[in-house]
């Protein structure tokens, strides 16, 4: 006898979510409290996160990770990281390692509770034989197309397989031959014998095992039949003593099969399956099929491309794990399907980086200013690394004869209310002096290559006695303090707020990344931080592993303000 041993929103509510109490209050936690109080759970709370290693984790998985690990931690329990590795055709050890890295990065530790469905293949197969012996399962010779054709629809009942009434002995012999490798891939399946007229299509004699002659990333060629997820998942939950099997709403219709399997095999533990709504985000597709196509068709540079909604992509874009955890708390746990505005995630990212990222000036599209009345050594200036946090200290700036401003901070034909530099006009250089544009120098094609300006020595920031009243303040970087960098600005990968998984290419944003060269204050190398606020531009993340001798790459993590 085989026994288990339990191991010891909608878009209209964004403003409310931004100001909500982030202490979790939801029906799942209420259920756990009730189960503890009435004695339904007689030992510690045990949950699991069961990803399939056939791709990278995405932002939708983050909600499930935070929920499963979060509730177990809150109630003093434990969580299994269990890989659903039942399809050798799509899974790999590389995906396993990527998933482990993502869960760990998000802030969670499974300790010694790392398991795989393949750990239980022998037990799962034994339960399959038990169902056959009990007359609850049969081997079916129908092809995949024939099986689908006889399944029925939501309005018509299914048809019994012509092989449904095989004897127990014949079914057992055929199943053992399947296991021994006597049949070709896809030629036979083991099906549960439930009810082909059930209104729940998942109860219409579902497939439990299929023949696949392919090497498994952990078991090699030991097996040539593999269990289906619906058969595997509930058994693994029971064997591991999972007290609350938390699934997203698409598995709600599968719950009856989950219960049927555990009710019809000789196992002494039956976890409850509890469903919650998945995380849907605007401008985002989390279908692994689509993500894989984006990678395979080279629309992006791999699963960890910063434009991807994968956790690895978000990490490479510089999104802090704390911001994702905060985002998941604010989204909450409900049974109502909804789509969350991307601005909420941006808000959580800014809130986290506001207290972590020092500031600096960056000139994205440099325009040279030649200070005609300046001579001698460069002037050293100081500025705060952070406007509010004194513990960040001070940084040194340089002002000299040649400095650079952004092209957008000068206009020969300024629009109304333009407050930056114009011919004959004055403007303050941030943390430095007031300058006046005296001459615009152009090349033969008419392109502006230089501005000749005058600076006012008595207008030094913090000690201005010039009496001048410039209307605007602009950034600058002195030539002798400039470090060339590459900036990568990201937009949504999909233009539509609700892109379709079937027509996703129609919504693909061909301008989802813009690469530009820029100049930044060289003194940023005095600090070890990877996150920076480029003033007036946004929060940026220095690409890990860059060499100081090579032009560093900075990814825009998030802009400075909400677009709504």
Image: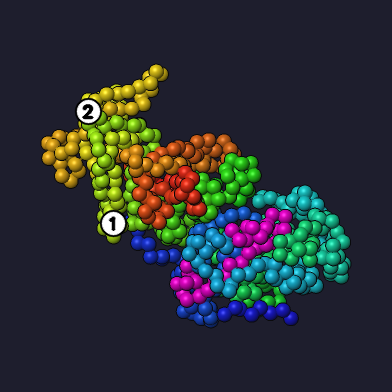
State whether residue 344 appears in this view. no
Range covered by the magenta-colored residues: 70-98
Name the residue that disc number 2 marks.
425
Name the residue that disc number 1 marks.
393
- Give the residue at x 55% y 61%: 101
Q: Nearer the viewer, residue 497 or 32?
A: 497
Above-or-below relation of 39 to 227: below
Q: Nearer the viewer, residue 163 or 90?
A: 90
Name the spot of residue 45 as percent of width and height, x first.
52, 75
Q: Quadrant of residue 403?
A: top left
Q: Residue 292, which numbered label?
A: none
Q: Is residue 256 left or right of residue 323?
A: right
- The answer to if 85 sits in the magenta stretch is yes
Answer with mark 2 or mark 1, whichever residue precedes in sequence.
1
Q: Nearer the viewer, residue 386 or 186?
A: 386
Name the spot of residue 452 as percent of width and height, x first.
28, 27
For label 2, the SS is loop
Name the spot of residue 41 as percent of width and height, x first.
53, 78
**Quadrant location of the C terminus in the rendered image:** top left
**Quadrant location of the N terminus in the rendered image:** bottom right
Label 2 close to label 1 by CB (< 8 Å): no
**Number of marks:** 2
Marks 2 and 1 sit apart, C-alpha to C-alpha, by 34 Å
Above-or-below relation of 240 to 96: below
- Give the residue at x 54% y 38%: 508
Q: Nearer the viewer, residue 345 or 438?
A: 438
Q: Is residue 121 left or right of residue 394?
A: right
Above-or-below relation of 16 to 28: above
- Give the residue at x 60% y 75%: 241
């Amino acid at each position: 006898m085989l026994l288990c041993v339990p191991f010891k929103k909608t878009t209209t509510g964004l403003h409310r979510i931004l100001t909500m109490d982030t202490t979790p209050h939801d029906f799942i936690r209420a259920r756990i409290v009730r189960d503890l109080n009435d004695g339904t759970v007689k030992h510690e709370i045990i949950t699991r996160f069961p990803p399939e290693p056939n791709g990278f984790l995405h932002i939708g998985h983050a909600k499930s990770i935070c929920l499963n690990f979060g509730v177990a931690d809150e109630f003093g329990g434990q969580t299994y990281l269990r890989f659903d590795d039942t399809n050798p055709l799509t899974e790999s050890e590389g995906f396993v390692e990527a998933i482990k890295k993502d869960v760990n990065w998000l802030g969670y530790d499974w300790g010694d509770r790392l398991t795989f469905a393949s750990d239980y293949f022998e037990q799962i197969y034994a339960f399959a034989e038990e169902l056959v012996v009990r007359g609850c399962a049969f081997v079916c010779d129908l092809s995949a197309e024939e099986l689908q054709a006889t399944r029925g629809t939501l309005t018509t009942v299914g048809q019994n397989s012509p092989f449904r009434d095989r004897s127990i002995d014949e079914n057992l012999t055929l199943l053992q031959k399947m296991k021994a490798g006597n049949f070709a891939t896809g030629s036979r399946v083991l099906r549960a014998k439930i009810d082909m007229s059930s209104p729940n299509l998942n109860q219409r004699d579902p497939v439990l095992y299929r023949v696949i002659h392919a090497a498994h990333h952990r078991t090699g060629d030991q097996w040539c039949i593999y269990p289906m997820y619906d058969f595997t998942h509930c058994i693994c939950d029971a064997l591991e003593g999972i007290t609350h099997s938390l699934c997203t709403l698409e598995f709600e219709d599968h719950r009856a099969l989950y219960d049927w399997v555990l009710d019809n095999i000789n196992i002494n533990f039956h976890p409850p399956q509890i469903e919650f709504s998945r995380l849907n985000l605007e401008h985002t597709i989390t279908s692994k099929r689509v993500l894989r196509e984006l990678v395979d068709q080279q629309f992006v540079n791999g699963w960890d491309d910063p434009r991807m909604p994968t956790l690895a992509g978000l990490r490479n874009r510089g999104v802090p794990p704390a911001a994702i955890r905060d985002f998941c708390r604010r989204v909450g746990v409900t049974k109502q399907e909804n789509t969350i505005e991307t601005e909420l995630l941006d808000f959580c990212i800014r809130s986290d980086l506001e207290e972590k990222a020092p500031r600096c000036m960056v000139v994205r599209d440099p325009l040279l200013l030649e200070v005609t009345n300046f001579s001698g050594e460069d002037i050293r200036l100081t500025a705060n690394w952070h406007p509010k946090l004194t513990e960040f200290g001070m940084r040194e700036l340089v002002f000299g004869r040649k400095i650079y401003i952004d092209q957008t901070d000068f206009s020969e034909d300024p629009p109304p209310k333009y407050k930056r530099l114009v011919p004959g006009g004055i403007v303050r250089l941030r943390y430095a002096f007031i300058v006046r544009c005296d001459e615009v120098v152009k090349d033969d094609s008419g392109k502006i290559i230089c501005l000749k300006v005058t600076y006012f020595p008595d207008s030094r920031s913090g000690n201005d006695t010039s009496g001048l009243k410039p209307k605007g303040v602009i950034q600058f970087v002195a030539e002798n303090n400039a470090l060339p960098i590459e900036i990568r600005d990201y937009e949504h990968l999909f233009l539509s707020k609700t892109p379709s998984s079937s027509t996703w290419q129609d919504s693909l944003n061909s301008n989802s990344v813009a690469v530009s060269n820029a100049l930044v204050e060289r003194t940023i190398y005095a600090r070890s931080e990877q996150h920076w606020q480029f003033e007036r531009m946004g929060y940026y993340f220095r690409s890990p592993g860059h060499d100081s001798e090579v032009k560093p790459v900075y990814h825009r993590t998030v802009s400075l303000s909400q677009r709504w």
